[in-house]
């Protein structure tokens, strides 16, 4: 018996040694990361205006072969909890025991981050998460989208794009994925090991001539198993949200057999299959006591939009029985903007 155990351990060690010898360095944009090590560096990107910006990366390259997982934060630069989670995550991964490779893009839109700008890159006024697949010779935001869609996604077997409620948005955490393509089941499986209790599948079908626009949708259209994680709200940096994100990402790595241990198991999550939105009919001031995660009944009064003198222009009531997934929470509102996004609750069974 004891001999058998010794033999098994020896075989396991020989296996690890053999895989060590087989694992090549990981090269990315001129950086060479030896097996079993990590490296942090920036990748320059020409803006087309004669200067360049840069994208901050950390790559963790395991000693054993396995998949390549791309983790992105800061597509929106005012969404801090995912950015802070990806600051912490590299130190939480046991690189000598890592199978495969993790590519961390710490902040996709550094100009929006340093400019403290919600939604838009102050350099060109574009929303990176409405710019995919981007343009090789476009504006700076379009070039970042192109870089992610081509240079980064071409190296990834799995992708997680990490967001939160933006600086002006309240949000209940959820894992979103596209029920699209041959990778849909793999994306769904990732969503179910995040530990998030709300899961949102969405279609990714495109009309003729339509573009992906969203980072995760671009990954889905490239048939890469992928997720959007949404966790955090209102420009906050709370440790609870940051921890939920790192916990979810480490669980995904265990699910993909990249790290030892068991992934989290879904405990009857609420799967939101139908959504509803309410848009603002006016530019003005939003007043609301509603909050993300709130259960609403159809017709319930939720908010008003006033002009700048306080005259009410629009009264907003819940259009469905449902829950508020995310919503604008700060006063400024523009005509045509979505104020509320609801998850619709299934109708009670009729007798
Ligand atoms: Zn976002």
Image (cartoon, rainbow, N blue to C red):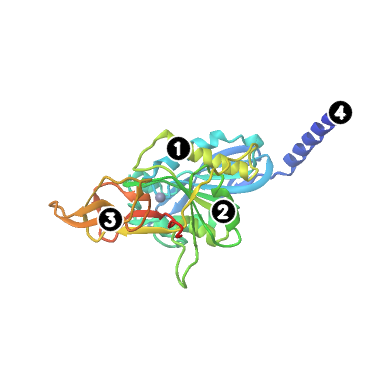
Along the line of sight, the residue nearer the viewer: 139 or 71: 71
**Badge number at residue 1:** 4
> What residue is disc 1 on?
242
Neighbour class for label 4 at 10 Å: few (<14), some, many (≥20)? Answer: few
Judged by depth in the image, the label closer to the viewer, 4 or 3, is 3
Residue 118 lies left or right of residue 157; in this view the side is left
Q: Is residue 336 left or right of residue 1?
A: left
Query: Does 47 sit left or right of 258 as displayed?
Result: left
> Dot 2, how many residues are within 10 Å of its Cα: few (below 14), some (14-19), or many (20+)?
many
- One can see residue 271 in this view: yes
Mark 4 or mark 3: whose residue is earlier in sequence: 4
Outermost residue to the bottom: 208
Q: Which residue is mark 3?
A: 317
Disc 3: CA contacts within 10 A as few (<14), some (14-19) or many (>=20): some
Q: Secondary structure at mark 1?
A: helix
Residue 48 visible in the shown view: no
Q: Earlier in the sequence, mark 1 or mark 2?
A: 2
What whole-number distance in Å separates the C-alpha atoms at marks 4 and 1?
Answer: 46 Å
Image vertical order of residue 299 relative to residue 259, above or below: below
Mark in the foreground, 1 or 2: 2
User: Label 2, on which residue?
Assistant: 187
Quadrant showing the N terminus:
top right
SS state under label 2: helix
Q: Earlier in the sequence, mark 4 or mark 1?
A: 4
Residue 293, percent from left and from top: 38, 45
């Amino acid at each position: 018996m004891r001999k058998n155990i010794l033999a098994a351990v020896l075989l396991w060690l020989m296996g690890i040694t053999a895989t060590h010898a087989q694992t090549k360095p990981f090269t990315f944009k001129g950086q060479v990361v030896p097996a079993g090590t990590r490296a942090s560096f920036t990748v320059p990107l020409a803006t087309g205006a004669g200067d360049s910006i840069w994208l901050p990366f950390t790559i963790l390259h395991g000693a054993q072969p396995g998949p390549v997982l791309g983790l992105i934060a800061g597509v929106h630069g005012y969404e801090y909890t995912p950015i802070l989670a990806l600051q912490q995550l590299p130190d939480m991964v046991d690189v000598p025991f890592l199978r495969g490779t993790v590519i961390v893009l710490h902040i996709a839109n550094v100009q929006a981050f340093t400019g403290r700008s919600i939604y838009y890159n102050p350099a060109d006024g574009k929303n990176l998460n409405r710019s995919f697949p981007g343009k090789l010779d476009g504006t700076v935001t379009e070039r970042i989208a192109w870089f992610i869609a081509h240079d980064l996604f071409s190296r990834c077997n799995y992708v997680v794009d990490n967001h939160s409620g933006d600086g002006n948005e309240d949000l209940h955490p959820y894992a979103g994925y596209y029920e699209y393509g041959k990778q849909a089941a793999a994306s769904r499986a990732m969503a179910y090991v995040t530990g998030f209790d709300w899961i949102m599948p969405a279609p990714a079908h495109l009309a003729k001539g339509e573009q992906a626009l969203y980072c995760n949708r671009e990954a889905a259209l490239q048939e890469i198993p992928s997720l959007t994680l949404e966790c955090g709200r209102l420009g906050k940096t709370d440790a609870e949200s940051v921890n939920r994100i790192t916990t979810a990402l480490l669980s995904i790595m265990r699910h993909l057999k990249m790290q030892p241990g068991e992934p989290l198991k879904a405990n009857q999550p609420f799967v939101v299959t139908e959504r509803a939105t309410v848009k603002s009919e006016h530019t003005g001031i939003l007043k609301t006591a509603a909050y993300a995660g709130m259960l609403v009944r159809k017709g319930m009064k939720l908010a008003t939009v006033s002009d700048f003198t306080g005259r009410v222009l629009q009264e907003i009531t819940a259009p469905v029985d449902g829950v508020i997934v995310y919503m604008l929470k700060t006063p400024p509102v523009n005509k045509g903007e979505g104020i509320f996004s609801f998850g619709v609750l299934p109708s009670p069974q009729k007798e």
